[in-house]
Image (cartoon, helix red, strand yellow):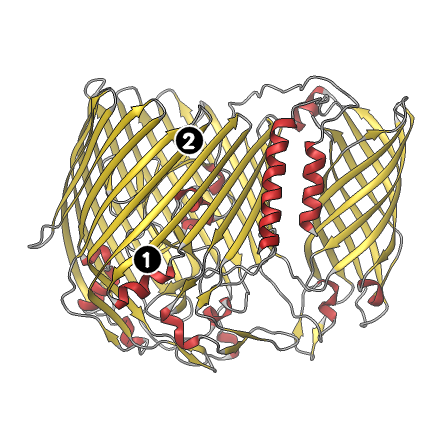
Amino acid sequence: MILKVLYMSLILFAKPSVDRPSEPKFHSSAQDSIQTEMIVRTEDLFWDSGWTYFSLDRISYKVNTGDFGYYGPQPGYLLDGIPVDPTYFGMNFPQVLPVPLNQIAKINTMNGMGVAAGVPYHSGLLKLQSGDLKDGLSIYSSTQLGHNSQEPGPWIFDSENVSPNIDRFGHWLDGGFSLKFGPWYSKGNIQRLSFLNSNPFVQLRIRNLIGFPEESDWPDGRSSALLGLLETGVKTDRLHFRVQGIQSESEDFLFFQPLGREIPTDLMSEQLSATGEFSFTENFGIRAMAQYREKGTGYRRNRFGEEFDWKKVEEIGRVSLFLETNSFEIDLGSEYKIVDLEASGIEDDEQKYLDIFFDQTIQMSPRLTFGSTTVLTFHDNEMPLQLQGFLNFEFTDYWSTGFAGSYAELLPEIANPFDEWVANGYYLLDQLKIDNFVPIEIPSTELSKISHQHQFLFSEKIKTTIKATYYDHKQFNIPYQDAYYYIELSTLPGGYFLFPGNSGHRLRLSLKSELDWSERLYQSFGFYRTKTLEGTPAYERYWKTIPDYIIRHTTVFHPYPDLEMRLNVEYQTKTVWEEYRRLDGELNRSFNVQFPFQLYRFNNTVSPGVNMDLTFAKWFWEQRLRVVFMLNNLLNRDLQSHPIGSVDGFGYMVRFEVRL
Amino acid sequence: MRQDMRKIFLTIIILFISGWSHFIHSQDAFSELKFTLTGNAVLGGNTVQKSWSPTGGFGFELTTPYYFGNFEIGARYTRYNELQFDDSGFNSTYIFAGWNYTHYVSGEKDLSIVPGIRFGSRYMIFDEQATYRDEYQFSRFESEFSYEVLFRIQYRINERLEFYSSAAINQTRFKIPYAEWMGTAGFTFIFNTSDGMENFLK
């Protein structure tokens, strides 16, 4: 029905008026035109990347950049050139990024390993850029809320038919300011976030793990976070110096793979950064950065006296020299990192890492470009190496081709940090009564890749890129837990294993077309095919959690300067989760108050799904106010991305923004 | 699945066509502001009317021309008395934003037909809290996404006054489908927008 309504409205919109003809009268805004990515949900950050992701609550995500799957290293985050880390135990919590989603003006996605702005990354990078600061004082604020359909409505009084469904996104509230006078600036923001997901599957999160609490001891199903950022700096043609502090505290739920469930968890982080960039000449300069980062977790309601507290302190120094001309770019530098971990069974575990990196791109002729990146790490007696190179050649102005290859050796502290901690004495699994089988010596992960691509410019408006990537995982550690079905608590953790010594080959084909019809209409089509060619049995099972085919489409339509519409469509094929095979087909129940009493069934195969989201945004007051309205899952299909993740139907979100 | 794909492709094609045709024959956006006071009555509906009896209601709308069609916001209040379930009467307010298109059917441009669509949320306040087994008390407040398609006939009495009568099919996406036909009639007062107001709306 809703589709019919939308079609009707769109058709009406498309129909030319003949009654009151006149030329369009576009206003010229008093403000600079504001371009943002129109990010409404945290998952929108990953939309254009071609990566896959799953979530249990549609807020926090595990991401597969293609290199190491969901349980490998997660992508890095670079916010305005400063690294931030919103991940805990390999789970991404983008909601605690120290920038409101609506303030993100641009997202660039980097794949594989590399160096960006003097910062090495291992498995993809999200470069987030907030908007330019304006002279003088600027302030902004926004609030956002939404929920899925299926509320009980007036039938709340009919206990035979419905139960209270209290899914609520939000409300989220944020505010910020910037001050800029000449070269000096200062900015800050604060965010208060809240989210409640009461989907029957997600209710697993609030059950106790190893016993039944008293009625009043059940933790609240709501997540909340409070975070903020303060930054000040000086920016001239030659110098950019800044000092930044960020802090976040949240009550959340952490998907803990060794347990096969979420744990109610307190998350906290603090980060202090000082960074400077000085250009000796127009082309040559130096970058330096010092960072102190502290992240920790605690248990939201600890009834059984377990020690879940975990704290990691990182002290990082980076320095690099850069040279940028029309024909070549060089970045040569070093990163020194001291990591101090405090957790149950681990005391004074101080690890030191030194990275030396060299990144260069040379335009060898008007049509030939060569680039390479080398990162050499020194840690204890080990010296893992990461390197990549590419060669791009333009056959014509409309056709270019490229070859790339890379080799990466990742220490277990990078590729399998949790297992490395367990091997060093972290006894969280023992407290959770999980039998663990983690080797004392965990080998490094090794990956080689080669890729070949063609890019066609069919016209100024149409660009198509076709790329094939071959992955050779020479040594791959695969974590595995065996979730059991247990009627009283829904699931119980089985044994936890880390299987080293796996290897295999994969192939990824991608095709992406961007159609820039006009300033007002943009479309993109992405087609991604991945396939495991061969590998050890555990390797082949591991990659079944990634869909074989993904199709993504986006239409962005600006009919008038103050109005924007965005349509996202995605199709994914099924995924199979071996770890949950013992739950497959089991009936389970909701623990929340529910009338009538209902059962639902676990399935370790996540069905193929089509999702369609439509977003409208209208500016007011010459781009000072904006209302954003998003309709999620227009087809109202049951969408799920993980066997114990929430099943979501149609929903909506609305956001009000003001910037002065 | 095949039906889904058909809908998706249709939506993409419509957006594409809209992209090329949108700029044709635009009008002077936000040049006037219409304030409408309405009375409304539920003309029919589905299961909701088996358990609750709606009374007449009232509402208001603010409408302004856009480059193409018109934008509107508004609210509509209706009272529903219980027929079943003790103390289950409730007050409902539908708050919406919408778009409609004015098609003049007379040469003098005094008579027009106006199809449109509205999106919003239906907010309910129940007379009493629902309690189950003397134990679980539910909130008195409830809300859900609601949309409607409307069709109205509009008559311009003079430069500053209009009368209209409309019918709309409303659907609110509760767990149990909630659909009703709503009849509305009202008088519209027309004002020219000030420069400040016009700038605000742009």
Badge 1 sits on which subunit? A
Direction left: furthest residue: A381
Q: Nearer the viewer, residue A334 or A481?
A: A481
Mark drawn on residue B135:
none
Query: In the rendered image, which residue does mark 1 sit on?
Result: A90
- Residue B25 on image: x %, y %: 71, 22
Q: Determine which quarter of the picture holds residue A413.
A: bottom left
Q: Disc 2 to disc 1, how far (Cα)?
A: 35 Å
**Mark 2 residue type:** Lys
Q: Chain of mark 2?
A: A
Q: Quadrant of the C terminus of chain A?
A: top right
Q: Position of residue B28 (x, y in %)?
A: 72, 21
| Residue A163 location, quadrant | bottom right
Residue A34 visible at all: no
- In the image, taking residue A385 as reference, residue A80 lies left or right, namely right
What is the three-letter code of the residue carrying label 1? Gly
Tell me where residue A75 appears, x and y as whole percent.
32, 48
**In the rendered image, which quarter is residue A573 located in?**
bottom left
* Front position in the image: A534 or A642: A534
Q: Which residue is mark 2?
A: A463
Q: Nearer the viewer, mark 2 or mark 1?
A: 2
Q: Tag 1, which secondary structure?
A: loop
What crowding class fits label 1: few (fewer than 14 Cα within 10 Å), some (14-19), or many (20 or more)? many
Q: Relative to residue A485, is residue A648 depicted above or below?
A: above
Sequence-first disc among 2 and 1:
1
Q: Secondary structure at mark 2?
A: strand
Report whether residue A251 is seen.
yes
Q: Is residue A175 left or right of residue A548?
A: right
Horizontal relation, residue A215 to residue B115: left or right: left
Q: Residue at x 61, y 48 (%)?
A: B6
